[in-house]
Image (cartoon, grey):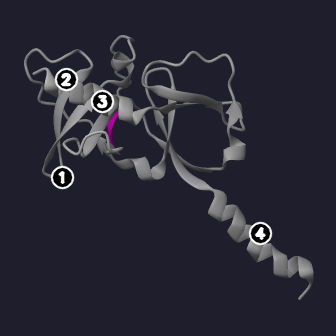
Amino acid sequence: MSNAEAAAPANSLTRRANDVPAMLLPVADKLLLLPGVSVAEIVNYSYPDCPDNAPEWFLGYINWRKLSVPLVSFEMLNGQGMPRSSGSRRIAVLNNTGVSDGIPFIAILIQGIPRLLRITDRDLGDVTDAVLAPAEQLAANLPGGETVFIPDVSALERAFADYLKNC
């Protein structure tokens, strides 16, 4: 076996170890990029049970795996209007980031089918002119030139926790 053949599997393993499974979630006019471990599940849209006097961005509770999970509009929480339905709405149930133990999951409304991909930090190019909304941490370009936004899931949780405190 040549040195090149011996090195190939190690390079392949190293490449895989540095890749991060990720998900692209389409919202109204953006793509959100999240690590795969942040997304508990993508489920079909179901009508939430919304309490009276809830803020516009809080769409209500959905039933997921025998749990009542808050569903929020990412766009409305960022000061945008309610997105028009694309006809293929889904819900992304996101894992807790640790802001509140009382909120084990939070869900966002997505507009379409999410995409799976594997990325490395080298795949993300800087975007210097992006204006970030309150629930966005970072904007980046993918190798094909597609701009993605990394959401601040803890901001979603904090907004919901604050809402619960004021109920």
Local SS, label 3:
helix
User: Which residue type does callout 2 highlight?
Assistant: Tyr
Asked whether the viewer can see residue 84, the reply is no
The residue singled out by tag 2 in the image is 163
Q: Which residue is mark 1?
A: 65
Q: Quadrant of residue 167?
A: top left
Q: Residues within 10 Å of mark 3 (few under 14, many from 20)?
A: some
In screen coordinates, is 7 left or right of 129?
right
Q: Amino acid at mark 4?
A: Asn
Upstream in the sequence, badge 2 or badge 3?
Answer: 3
Q: Is residue 25 inside the magenta stretch?
A: no
The dot on residue 11 is 4
Q: Nearer the viewer, residue 145 or 125?
A: 125
Which residue is under mark 3? 158
Above or below 53: residue 93: below
In 3D space, how far apart are the residues under numbered discs 2 and 1 (Cα atoms)? 24 Å
Indicate which disc, 2 or 1, sits on the residue closer to the N terminus.
1
Residue in view at x 24 percent, y 32 percent? 71
